[in-house]
Image: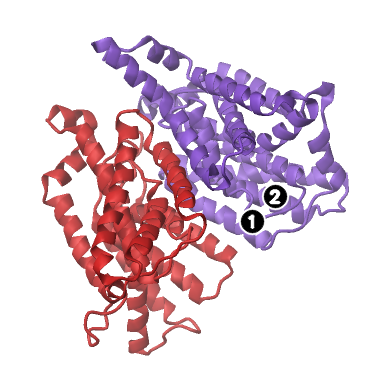
């Protein structure tokens, strides 16, 4: 099969297409909303995008390792309900930070449960994390059956309104995680991750600790879901046992728009971060474009499908021309 | 020690029977009254029919391999149910038209999935997920949030009621048994079925042995869409009302039913009998938890836990060291 130049380029740089989409959506958004790069607007957008970006980072690592994690939404709900019920609206900051630490440990534990079943008992990732998503979402509803509770207002404000050096807090958080990813992917672990996602059997034969790597991706995903849960709790300031559910499939879409192959071993984390931002901006564009309310869902879904199919359309076009 | 091996469909059915007998011991269970027990069993089977039919398409795409999965099944069920509801609008003559529309629309959406997956190389998970969004959007556009229509009396009679008053078995169950036999013929006794297992096991060897992999893929996804459409038709015939969230609750259970029935999610191996057994087990557990008046939270946790145990027993993939 002859590969076109575009195909070769997207194979080497899977995030390239995500970058094109991101720039495109930024331009369209800027035309519809000229003040979008003003500090306030930028911050109010980024703080809304951050939870799904954090979740997408964890999802990206699981998908790179050849798995998928459908339970992340459930983990977010658990963290949200724990923070909202245990800290409370009039809790002290010390109490809040203590529970942030506990939340992160819970995320690690939830991820470790997924990892145990998938890596050590060798169960199929989709159906396993689907089962645990019920466990986690059920637990969240058990902790908080009806929406309510909350975290102290000053702490929520810290997340919502901090703009060090006139840049949204979210930028710094994203930068930190991307730097960590750059460091990790340059280490031996990074190469192991791509090897396991590419072909687990071959990786096993070349002495890659496949089980351990698979296990670790779910633990990382659980941890990132916990960060996401903390962020969304600070954003909303209140508790809701169903808050994480709709986020799961969005995080997977973000990862795929970011150029990672769902079969594993291809892509990175920067692409999925851009994919998550693109999804958020798309929502903005649709609400600014004055589209008839009844058509909003349809238009948004069509744009997402076209974005997902676009690399394939380009390839189809190129190879056709190459042959004739 | 020799390992005792029971095939997954049999194991799932055994589990269903044991669970059902145990449920009789509950405070509000059927106790020793055989008539009540039979009525309850019939009712659970009747509810399982809809999950079972919707999971049939899922079984096909999952067997076809290549990470095959159909996440658009739920919204296709909703869309076709609404179309049937609106088209039929209470008249017996239009039932056949409604059924044909449901099958055609389902097949068309499935065909679009197939095109995206085979020609544009989008992975089935995201292609069908995206399609699910598009169909949900289309439902909102078409209905504007409210639907006016009516189910025809003949549908209720053919689906929800028994054939003869003395039979005491709703037609839905009979339809399901016939449907299951048809699925068995398609999977085990037809060229399509043989090719389906072939492309599921290994696409390259299948192509080299002369199987039209592209055509099979398009056909499988179209067929899966049509089966979801049939599910939508049956569902609206049974409930008699539609709403915008009618099909979505069936989506992930349909995948779980396939997995519980012993069909490998990686493709190439499985049966529709397994899916039927899986649908019965899942419906049974759900309705037991409802009868026990568990809060939603506990219900979800028990369902998740049971699913985890079920797949731990026989959903394990082979070890790397082989």
Place of residue B203 in the rendered image (x, y in percent of width and height, measured from the top left): 23, 32
Q: Which secondary structure lies at badge 2?
A: helix
- The chain in red: B
Q: How is the image coloured?
A: by chain
User: 10 Å neighbourhood of mark 2: few (<14), some, or many (≥20)?
Assistant: many
- The chain in purple: A
Place of residue B50 in the rendered image (x, y in percent of width and height, measured from the top left): 34, 64
Could you tell whether B69 is left or right of B103 in the image? right
Instruction: Report the Cα–Cα distance between label 1 and label 2.
Output: 8 Å
Q: How many marks?
A: 2
* Contact (Cβ within 8 Å) of mark 1 with mark 2: yes
Question: Which residue: 32% across, 71% down?
Answer: B152
Name the residue nearer the viewer: A63 or B4: A63
Q: Quadrant of residue B228?
A: bottom left
- The residue identified by callout 2 is A80
- The residue identified by callout 1 is A140
């Amino acid at each position: 099969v002859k590969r076109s130049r575009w195909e070769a380029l997207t194979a080497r740089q899977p995030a390239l297409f995500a970058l094109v989409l991101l720039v495109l959506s930024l331009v369209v958004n800027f035309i519809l909303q000229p003040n979008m790069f003003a500090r306030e607007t930028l911050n109010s957008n980024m703080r809304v995008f951050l939870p799904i970006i954090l979740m997408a980072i964890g999802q990206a690592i699981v998908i790179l390792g050849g798995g998928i994690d459908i339970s992340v939404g459930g983990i977010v709900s658990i963290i949200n309900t724990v923070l909202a019920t245990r800290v409370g609206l009039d809790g002290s900051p010390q109490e809040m930070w203590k529970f942030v630490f506990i939340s992160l440990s819970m995320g690690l534990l939830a991820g470790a449960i997924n990892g145990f079943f998938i890596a050590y008992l060798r169960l199929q990732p989709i159906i396993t994390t689907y089962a645990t998503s019920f466990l986690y979402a059920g637990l969240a509803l058990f902790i908080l059956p009806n929406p309510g509770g909350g975290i102290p207002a000053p702490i929520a404000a810290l997340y919502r309104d901090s703009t060090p050096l006139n840049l949204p807090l979210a930028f710094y958080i994203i930068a930190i995680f991307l730097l960590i990813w750059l460091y990790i992917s340059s280490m031996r672990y990074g190469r192991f991750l791509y090897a396991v996602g590419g072909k687990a059997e071959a990786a096993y034969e070349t002495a890659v600790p496949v089980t351990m790597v698979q296990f670790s991706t779910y633990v990382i995903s659980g941890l990132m879901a916990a960060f996401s849960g903390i962020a969304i709790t600070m954003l909303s300031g209140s508790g809701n046992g169903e808050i994480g559910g709709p986020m799961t499939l969005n995080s997977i879409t973000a990862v795929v728009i970011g150029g990672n192959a769902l079969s594993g071993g291809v892509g990175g984390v920067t692409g999925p971060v851009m994919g998550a931002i693109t999804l958020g901006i798309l929502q903005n564009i649709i609400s600014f474009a004055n589209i008839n309310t009844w058509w909003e869902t349809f238009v948004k879904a069509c744009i997402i499908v076209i974005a997902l199919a676009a690399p394939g359309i380009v390839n189809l076009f190129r190879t056709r021309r190459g042959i004739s | 020690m020799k390992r005792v091996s029971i095939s997954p469909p049999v194991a799932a059915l055994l589990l269903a029977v044991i669970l059902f007998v145990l449920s009789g011991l509950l405070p509000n269970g059927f106790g020793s009254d055989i008539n009540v027990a039979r009525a309850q069993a019939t009712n659970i089977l009747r509810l399982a029919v809809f999950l079972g039919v919707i999971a049939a398409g899922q079984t096909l795409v999952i067997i076809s391999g290549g990470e095959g999965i159909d996440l658009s099944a739920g919204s296709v069920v909703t869309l076709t149910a609404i179309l049937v509801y609106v088209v039929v609008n209470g008249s017996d003559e239009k039932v056949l038209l409604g059924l044909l529309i449901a099958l055609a629309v389902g097949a068309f959406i499935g065909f679009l999935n197939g095109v995206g997956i085979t020609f544009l190389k989008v992975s089935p998970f995201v292609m069908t997920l995206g399609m699910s969004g598009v169909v949900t959007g289309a439902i909102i556009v078409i209905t504007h949030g409210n639907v006016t229509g009516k189910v025809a009396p003949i549908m209720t009679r053919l689906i929800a009621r028994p054939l003869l008053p003395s039979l005491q078995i709703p037609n839905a169950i009979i339809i399901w048994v016939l449907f299951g036999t048809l699925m068995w013929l398609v999977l085990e006794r037809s060229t399509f079925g043989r090719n389906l297992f072939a492309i599921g096991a290994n696409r390259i060897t299948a192509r080299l042995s002369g199987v039209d992999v592209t055509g099979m893929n398009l056909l499988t996804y179209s067929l899966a869409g049509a089966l979801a459409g049939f599910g939508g038709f049956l569902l609206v015939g049974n409930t008699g009302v539609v709403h915008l969230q009618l099909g979505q609750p069936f989506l992930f259970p349909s995948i779980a039913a396939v997995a519980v029935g012993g069909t490998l999610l990686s493709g190439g191996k499985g049966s529709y009998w397994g899916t039927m057994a899986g649908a019965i087990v899942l419906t049974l557990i759900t309705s037991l938890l409802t009868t026990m008046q568990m809060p939603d939270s506990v219900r979800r946790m028990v369902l998740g836990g049971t699913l985890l145990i079920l797949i731990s027993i026989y959903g394990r993939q082979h070890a790397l060291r082989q």
